[in-house]
């Protein structure tokens, strides 16, 4: 089924302990599109400037993405510059140049308005709803956000959250958003606002899915070589939503598999700089790592005569 | 089979966001004994002072522990005072009084020297080996440690590690010990020193087991009400080793179940202050939460016709 993504397409400059890169392809919509493309062709809504390299669009197009919703506007493309320390866990923003992204007014091509699955990437929650307003009766809507919007546009963000089926957040964000430190209570608070599911991303530790009364915990795939954590969250969302749109169902079993596929796509994304891993990643590698994730998490029932004392 | 534990028996004073307690039963050997007691009677080697309340020993004895290795010495019992902030993740030590623990020279009663399973709690690595020297041909030895020993007695600690079958460490400790930030590489480094298994405890995120080439990832049981994280690691080790000694095998399947039981025992321990949860915890609750942990981590194979493109 059709899958729409709105988010950023950017030029990222990155410093990590393993090297640096200048103005490589980045942005939430780019990572999401590349990760979801294994399951179907995403429809991308974003904006780039006059300076955006055609080769980047060709790459996303070669993955099957429908780029007719990417507007090219006068001016420069959104740029982000960040540094990761030794632990690779925290990105320190060195520079943000919004450029054409500052005036981004997402407009859906007519061919996109019937999209059944929608991912609202981490942009201004006002714009997230402006996208939703243009989609006719979507079947399943998910959104991402970040601490900046939780702090600066809380009421608008809550209006968006009330309209989505699923929220992607990380540990710190769900705590900040709910005012609850305990992640179980924090997720329940979000569910009380309307979404039927919350995915709490925990980086190298995995992810938790709260869907109604159901809880699912997936360990992150342990990756020995992490080069660049940029885009891990959007790759997670891409794998998750790509699989959901492909399967056309949202049963508890499907949501669980989607979480694991999200983790798997994220685990590939961090193995190389930027989107480079997606240039060579084959579907069979995704299937193989999913099977490894099953073995990784596998354990059997207890014996019946186990306990010595009550 | 028989299970020996050496560690501290202490009086803890705790401050948490949910309240405080003065001089309650604590110490690694206490938590380990209570948690392991569901699977069999642990043999405890420790030291207490003249002031140690008889009621605490009665409690441990009521759980079946063999306390004939607990020496009562002139002087005061080991005391630890700590505070947890809002996030409950980090213990800030406010005061440590070693008292009789400063001169602790563990001596095994003759009835303990044939112990088959041994847990060397977090004490001076010299003393850990002094205990090992007194055990005749143990079947399976595990040890715990902490950043203090990694920094101050690294060579001695490495000598201990070379003699054990399994090391329990947390994330930060395994990184510090190995000099590797990546936890997969860090664990492999420890395995190269001799142990056949490493359990990396990750607090509220779960645990990883590295055993030879095998990796197992267990999510922590998500607990909505965490009151006091003290002793979670020792409760984990107690559940793990208690189950191992009960089963008498160390197959990959048994080690995996042991990790989950460790997580389950730890998840109970943190629900009340000190060892209080073990005063009411029933074996059937452990079995019930283990079954929940299975449901929590359960997901199915992928469909065969999944991918849109290679």
Image (tube, coloured by chain):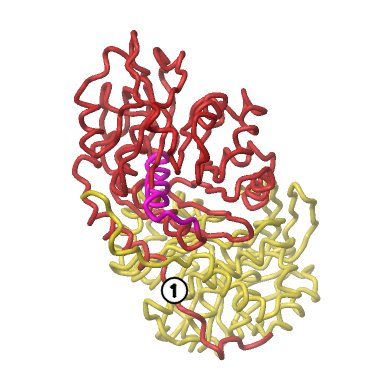
Chain colours: A yellow, B red
- Residue that extends furthest to the top in the rendered view of this protein: B74
When the figure is inspected, residue A146 is found, relative to residue A114, above or below; the finding is above
Mainly helix, strand or loop, the magenta region? helix
Indicate whether residue B245 is drawn in magenta.
yes
- Image coordinates of residue A242 in percent, x first then y, are 54, 79
Left or right of A52 on screen, residue A41: left
Say above or below: A11 vs B154: below
Question: Looking at the rendering, in which quadrant would you find the C terminus of chain B?
Answer: bottom right
Task: Tell me the residue at 26%/13% (across/down).
Answer: B51
Residue B36 rendering spot, x and y as whole percentages: 34, 44
What chain is tagged by disc 1? B
**Residue at the image point whose x is 54% and y is 29% from the top:** B133
Task: Tell me the SS state at disc 1.
Answer: loop
In the depicted structure, whether residue A98 falls above or below residue A88: below
From the viewer's side, name the closer residue of B171 and A184. B171
The segment highlighted magenta reads: B232-250
Query: What residue lies at 49% left-to-right and 47% top-to-bottom?
Result: B202
Q: Position of residue B153 (x, y in %)?
A: 62, 24
Q: Residue at x 28, y 67 (%)?
A: A213
- Give the crowd class for mark 1: few <14, some 14-19, many >=20 residues within 10 Å: many
Between B78 and A32, the residue placed more toward the observer is B78
Give the residue pinned by disc 1.
Answer: B299
> Would you place residue B272 above or below residue A137 in this image?
above
- Asked whether B122 or B185 is in front, the reply is B122
């Amino acid at each position: 089924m059709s899958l729409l993504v709105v988010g950023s397409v950017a030029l990222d400059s990155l410093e990590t302990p393993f090297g640096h890169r200048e103005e490589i392809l980045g942005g939430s919509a780019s990572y999401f599109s590349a990760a979801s493309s294994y399951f179907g062709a995403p429809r991308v809504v974003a904006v780039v400037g006059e300076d955006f390299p055609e080769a980047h669009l060709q790459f996303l197009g070669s993955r099957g993405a429908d780029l007719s919703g990417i507007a090219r506007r006068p001016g420069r493309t959104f740029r982000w510059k960040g540094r990761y320390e030794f632990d690779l866990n925290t990105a320190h923003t060195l520079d943000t140049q919004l450029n054409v992204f500052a005036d981004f007014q997402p407009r859906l091509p007519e061919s996109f308005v019937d999209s059944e699955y929608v991912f609202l990437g981490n942009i201004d929650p006002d714009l997230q709803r402006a996208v939703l307003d243009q989609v006719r009766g979507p079947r399943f809507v998910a959104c991402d956000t970040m601490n900046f919007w939780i702090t600066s546009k809380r009421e608008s963000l809550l209006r968006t959250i009330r309209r989505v089926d699923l929220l992607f957040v990380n540990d710190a964000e769900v705590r900040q958003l709910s005012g609850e430190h305990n992640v179980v209570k924090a997720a329940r608070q979000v569910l009380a606002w309307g979404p039927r599911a919350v995915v709490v991303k925990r980086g190298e530790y995995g992810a938790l899915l709260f869907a109604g009364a159901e809880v699912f915990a997936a360990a992150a795939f342990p990756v020995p070589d992490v080069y660049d954590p940029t885009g891990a969250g959007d790759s997670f969302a891409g794998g998750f939503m790509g699989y959901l749109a492909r399967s056309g169902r949202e049963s508890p079993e499907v949501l669980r598999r989607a979480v694991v596929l999200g983790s798997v796509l994220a685990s590939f994304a961090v193995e190389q700089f930027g989107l480079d891993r997606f240039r060579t990643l084959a579907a069979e590698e995704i299937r193989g790592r999913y099977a490894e994730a099953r073995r990784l998490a596998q354990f059997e029932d207890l014996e019946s005569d186990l306990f010595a004392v009550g």
